[in-house]
């Protein structure tokens, strides 16, 4: 067969192009086919996602190097609420890990296990998949309950210290055994509000959360808007069922099992989780405990009193 020089050139060009495409397609496959090194974290995960034991995908972020500090956020927010603490500690020689609770933020909106046992098991999945050890576990509000239930349910083998900030334990709801608690009608009101108009509710809820309704308060509109933005990322089913989890769960027996140094941090003007019905009672149950109460500080004190919280947290971590 006679072939012209131009046809030969075209054929070579086609072959070269095909080879480049084939090589490009093969490269990712080769990378994926590499066996995991022994230094890889244990468990099943993709980039910034961990699979919980029921298959739910849990988002996390992992910054810095050094001693490990984990963060569990409050209702109805996500891990980004901890950025002020995480960045500060990462700059001071710590590895900081925070996850979005199931149904919140970037985590999967699971239909089931939206309760404290489920939340504690998800935290365990993060810790075990990343193979974290000698951890200080930090939890705010509902996240404080998550930390306490994790320690009561999974033990303190991987934990060194705990920090509970504006946390819900021992129990929020008013009962015969807990007369100082908040009437169930208040939590029923929360459920009604998120079902009726959750967007407007989040805007209104942010005000007492940060104490913006107090005389002399200096809470920016950006802070309030940020709260709304994070809150709108949580699934309706998840935010609804979480109300029962944080308000009606009794953490008394979990608190009794905690045998590691624990720091309680609570605003004395907390309008969401009143200090007398939470930290003051938890302090009497815990063994090795230190408590810091902040005069005039609101529930969202990690934001409004960020510098003070960061300094006290760092001192406890280094102590």
Image (cartoon, grey):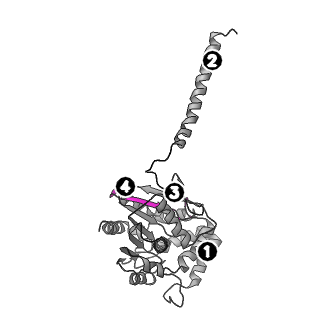
Choose the circle earlier in sequence order: 1 or 2: 2
User: Of discs 4 and 3, which sits in the foreground?
Assistant: 3
Point out residue 30 in the picture as x, y percentages from the top left corner.
54, 38
Choose the circle earlier in sequence order: 2 or 3: 2
Q: Looking at the rendering, in which quadrant would you find the C terminus?
A: bottom left
Q: Is residue 74 above or below residue 275?
A: above
Q: Secondary structure at mark 3?
A: loop
Residue under label 1, please give it: 193
Contact check, label 4 and label 3, Cβ < 8 Å:
no
Residue under label 4, please give it: 65
User: Of discs 1 and 2, which sits in the foreground?
Assistant: 2
Point out residue 17 in the picture as x, y percentages from the top left corner.
59, 25
Residue under label 2, please give it: 10
Residue 33 located within the stretch drawn in magenta: no
Q: CA distance from mark 3 to mark 1?
A: 39 Å
- Which stretch appears magenta? 91-106
Q: Secondary structure at mark 2?
A: helix
């Amino acid at each position: 067969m006679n072939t012209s020089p131009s046809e030969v050139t075209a054929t070579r060009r086609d072959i070269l192009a095909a080879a480049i495409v084939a090589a490009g397609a093969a490269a990712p496959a080769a990378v994926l086919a590499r066996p995991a090194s022994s230094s890889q974290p244990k468990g099943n995960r993709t980039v910034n996602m961990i699979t919980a034991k029921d298959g739910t995908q849990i988002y996390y972020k992992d910054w810095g190097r050094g001693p490990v500090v984990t963060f569990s956020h409050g209702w109805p927010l996500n891990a980004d609420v901890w950025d002020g603490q995480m960045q500060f500690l990462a700059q001071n020689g710590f590895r900081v890990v925070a996850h979005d609770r199931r149904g919140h933020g970037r985590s999967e909106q699971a239909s089931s296990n939206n309760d404290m046992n489920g939340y504690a098991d998800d935290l365990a999945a993060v810790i075990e998949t990343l193979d974290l050890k000698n951890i200080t576990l930090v939890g705010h509000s509902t996240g404080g309950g998550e930390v306490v239930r994790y320690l009561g349910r999974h033990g303190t083998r991987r934990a060194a210290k705990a920090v509970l900030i504006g946390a819900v334990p021992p129990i929020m709801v008013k009962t015969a055994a807990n007369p100082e608690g908040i009437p169930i009608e208040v939590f029923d009101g929360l459920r009604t509000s998120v079902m009726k108009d959750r967007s407007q509710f989040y805007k209104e809820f942010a005000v007492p959360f940060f104490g913006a309704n107090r005389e002399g308060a200096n809470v920016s509109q950006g802070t309030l808007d940020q709260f709304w933005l994070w809150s709108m990322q949580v699934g309706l089913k998840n935010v609804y069922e979480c109300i029962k989890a944080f308000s009606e769960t009794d953490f008394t027996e979990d608190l009794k099992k905690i045998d590691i140094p624990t720091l309680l941090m609570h605003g004395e003007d907390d309008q969401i989780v009143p200090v007398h019905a939470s930290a003051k009672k938890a302090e009497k149950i815990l063994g090795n405990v230190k408590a810091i109460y902040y005069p005039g500080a609101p529930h969202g004190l990690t934001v409004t009193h960020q510098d003070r919280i960061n300094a006290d947290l760092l001192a406890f971590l280094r102590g």
